[in-house]
Amino acid sequence: MTVYVDDVRHGFGRMVMCHMWADSLDELLAMADRIGLQRRWLQQPPKASWVHFDVSLALKAKAIEALTDKFGPLEHLARRDAASPVAEIAERGRRKLEQIARVRS
């Protein structure tokens, strides 16, 4: 899941807010569901310049915690390798992905 949160700090009443967005709407909504953010708070054009949620710092912390995975960077590189047109590199990537899946389970 590719979800992003920024370090901006906008005041909203007594809360401090930042932004959360993703590479796809499905990923963004899945994270909103995961951290307990109501979908009705989705910001999108024409009322906003891009599709995102404004999230409190507490929900930002929940999102970061949900995304933290010590195997994430390794998985990213393995997926890149697995998509390689070079057979040896692609096979190495597939083996790494299988190993990560075994360790996670």
Image: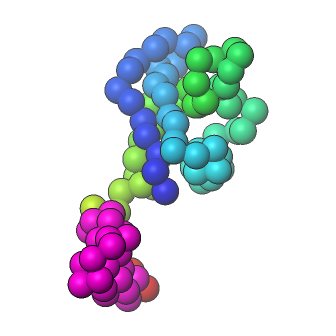
Seen at 27% across and 77% down, the residue is 86
- Which is nearer the eye, 21 or 94? 94
Tell me if residue 18 comes above or below residue 13 in the rendering. Answer: below
Residue 96, given in percent of the width and then of the height, sits at 29, 82
Instruction: In this rendered view, identify the residue nearer to me: 29 or 93.
Output: 93
Tell me: 86 left or right of 17.
Answer: left
The magenta stretch is: 74-103
Picture coordinates of residue 30, whole percent (x, y): 62, 52
Residue shown at the point (29%, 83%) measured from the top left: 87
Residue 15 percent coordinates (x, y):
51, 19
Q: With respect to residue 15, does 5 lie above or below?
A: below
Residue 59 lies in the magenta stretch = no
Q: What secondary structure predominates along the stretch shown in magenta?
A: helix
Task: Give the quadrant of residue 74.
Answer: bottom left
Give the tally of numbered discs. Answer: 0
Task: Say left or right for 44 vs 81.
Answer: right
